């Protein structure tokens, strides 16, 4: 009997996730890294995959139309901006997220970028390797007592806040959709408006999804509301930031720097202006790419596919296109609390 298939949009998947699929009679087929829609569609047709683990590349309506057998797309993480949710919902395809599975790893990376940026670790390391001893005239900055603003209060933001409190930072947050407990349990001051929030951010850490509402939410005007010398850390999505405005604010001295794990377009062009700025610390969207998080996220992504295909309950918070729940014509999609 031929095995059923799950397509992974990317060259690898944690062995524990592969084993989970195999134990349930599924084989995994992989695309190259950052494959375009045509390549993904072709592999879907050839493999007959019923589910996709979405890692790299965009899954749009054309991809879905090439695979009428496709029933579920499970994001390897939580950011689903590379998946056309409206198209999926219209075709009865469930879109899932691996909520919370990579929170600790991404939070650790956010704090790493924060420390590296504020303490100027990268340029100081480079200058020392180049034979310069730049202690005379150097003046650093102490983080304890500064205010860290969390834009979004999901599991990654909360994990970041817990670590930041250990460094002596106070916390404020903005998330109109978060429950009061998300703020209260961590001692986060809840801001009721974006201007109030940005004005308090000595360091701004981004943790919200990329949607029509949040795209470009960090722009020239909101940056101007931040204190002079503030820093921006982004381990969420590059599209949250107006990149030209960020560069301008750093060059003007209004911002002290930025630590960024993500770009508006990935991979970025070789001449991207970020590369010329010594006060911007960059990593290639690897905040959640750890052995531990990879195992948790991979297993959660595959488990979600298996649950949907078996008609089992899926936690409501994991369903990205919840409009499916209102479609009585989809009896195989269930919500569990």
Image (tube, grey):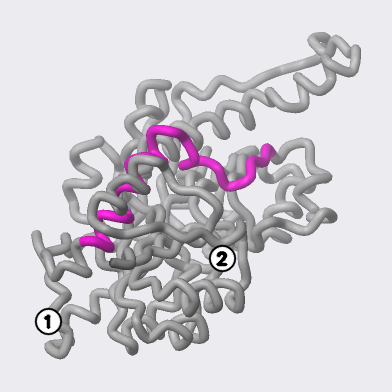
| Residue 172 in the image, given as x and y percentages of width and height | 36, 43
Q: Could you tell whether 307 is left or right of 229 in the image?
A: left
Is residue 286 placed above or below 35 in the rendered structure?
A: above
Is residue 142 placed above or below 240 in the rendered structure?
A: above
| Residue 58 in the image, given as x and y percentages of width and height | 54, 70
- Identify residue for label 1: 331
Q: Depth check: give the residue in front, 30 or 169.
A: 30
Q: Which residues are magenta?
A: 281-306
Q: Depth check: give the residue in front, 246 or 194.
A: 246
Is residue 116 placed above or below 336 in the rendered structure?
A: above
Count the marks.
2
- Identify residue for label 2: 57
Badge 1 density bin: few <14, some 14–19, many ≥20, Cα 10 Å:
few
Is residue 104 placed above or below 205 in the rendered structure?
A: above
Residue at point 22% right, 69% down? 309
Q: Please report whichever mark, 1 or 2, sits nearer to the chain's N-terminal start.
A: 2
Query: Real-space Cα distance between discs 1 and 2?
Result: 30 Å
Task: Tell whether position 48 is magenta.
Answer: no
| Residue 24 in the image, given as x and y percentages of width and height | 23, 55
Badge 2 density bin: few <14, some 14–19, many ≥20, Cα 10 Å:
many
Q: Depth check: give the residue in front, 82 or 138.
A: 82
The answer to whether residue 206 is seen in the rendering is: yes
Q: Could you tell whether 314 is left or right of 187 in the image?
A: left
The quarter in which the N terminus is drawn is bottom left
The answer to whether residue 222 is seen in the rendering is: no
Q: Could you tell whether 261 is left or right of 65 in the image?
A: right
Residue at point 50% right, 34% down? 109
Residue at point 55% right, 52% down? 11
């Amino acid at each position: 009997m031929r095995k059923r298939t799950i397509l992974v949009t990317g060259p690898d998947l944690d062995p524990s996730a592969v084993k989970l699929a195999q134990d349930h009679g599924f084989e995994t087929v992989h695309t190259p890294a950052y494959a375009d829609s045509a390549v993904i569609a072709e592999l879907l047709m050839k493999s007959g995959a019923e589910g996709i683990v979405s890692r790299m590349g965009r899954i749009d309506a054309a991809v879905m139309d090439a695979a009428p057998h496709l029933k579920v797309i499970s994001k390897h993480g939580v950011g689903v901006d590379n998946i056309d949710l409206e198209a999926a919902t219209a075709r009865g395809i469930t879109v899932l997220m691996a909520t919370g599975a990579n929170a600790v790893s991404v939070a650790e990376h956010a704090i790493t970028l924060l420390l590296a940026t504020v303490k100027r670790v990268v340029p100081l390391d480079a200058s020392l390797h180049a034979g310069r001893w730049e202690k005379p005239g150097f003046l650093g900055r102490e983080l304890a007592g500064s205010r860290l603003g969390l834009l979004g209060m999901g599991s990654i933001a909360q994990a970041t806040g817990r670590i930041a409190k250990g460094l002596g930072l106070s916390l404020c947050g903005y998330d109109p959709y978060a429950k009061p407990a998300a703020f209260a349990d961590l001692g986060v001051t809840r801001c009721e408006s974006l201007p109030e929030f940005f004005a308090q951010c000595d360091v701004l850490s981004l943790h919200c999804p990329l949607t029509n509402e949040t795209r470009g939410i960090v722009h020239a005007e909101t940056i101007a509301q931040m204190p002079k010398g503030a820093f921006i850390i982004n381990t969420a999505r590059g599209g949250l930031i107006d990149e030209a405005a960020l560069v301008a604010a750093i060059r003007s001295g209004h911002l002290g720097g930025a630590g960024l794990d993500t770009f508006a377009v990935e991979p970025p062009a070789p001449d991207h202006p970020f590369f010329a700025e010594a006060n911007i610390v960059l990593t290639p969207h690897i905040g959640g790419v750890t052995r531990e998080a990879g195992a948790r996220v991979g297993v959660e992504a595959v488990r979600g596919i298996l649950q949907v295909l078996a008609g089992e309950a899926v936690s409501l918070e994991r369903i990205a296109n919840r409009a499916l729940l209102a479609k009585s014509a989809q009896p195989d999609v269930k919500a569990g609390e």
